[in-house]
Image (spheres, rainbow, N blue to C red):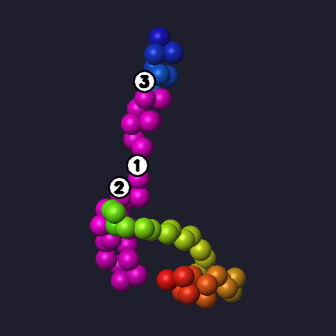
Amino acid sequence: MSVFILILFAASAMAQHKTLHDFTGRDIAGKTFDFSTLKGKKVMVVNTASRCSLTPQYKKLQQLY
């Protein structure tokens, strides 16, 4: 019985696979942004600190943009 429950749990976890397009977030103005609007577009996600002095990557990210 416990093996069946474990298999059921694993199947449920795999069924919940999400992509970027399943999420929403807030833009810089605080408005809701739906990532599904980016379907078919190339997207680069950058996670970086913005409230510290260790942000030299911004210059290169701006060049890339």
Q: Is residue 1 left or right of residue 51?
A: left
The amino acid marked with disc number 3 is Leu
> Dot 3 surroundings within 10 Å: few (below 14), some, or many (20 or more)?
few
Q: How many numbered marks are there?
A: 3
Q: CA distance from mark 2 to mark 1?
A: 6 Å
Q: Residue at x 41, y 58 (%)?
A: 20
Q: Is residue 56 left or right of residue 18?
A: right
Look at mark 2 in the image and give the residue it sits on: 22
Any part of residue 31 in sight: yes
Residue stretch in magenta: 10-37
Residue 23 on image: x %, y %: 37, 59
Mark nearer the N terminus (2 vs 3): 3
Residue 6 on image: x %, y %: 50, 22
Q: CA distance from mark 2 to mark 3?
A: 23 Å
Please, what secondary structure does the residue beneath circle 3 have? helix
Instruction: Tell me, for residue 8, which label it has, or none.
Output: 3
Q: Are marks 2 and 1 in contact (CB under 8 Å)?
A: yes
Mark nearer the N terminus (3 vs 1): 3
Q: CA distance from mark 3 to mark 1?
A: 19 Å
Seen in the picture, residue 53 relative to 37 is either above or below; the reply is: below
The amino acid marked with disc number 1 is Lys
Q: Residue at x 35, y 55 (%)?
A: 22
Seen in the picture, residue 31 relative to 14 is either above or below; the reply is: below
Question: Quadrant location of residue 32?
Answer: bottom left
Please, what secondary structure does the residue beneath circle 2 have? helix
Look at mark 1 in the image and give the residue it sits on: 18
Q: Residue at x 61, y 76 (%)?
A: 49
> Dot 2 surroundings within 10 Å: few (below 14), some, or many (20 or more)?
few
Q: Residue at x 44, y 36 (%)?
A: 14
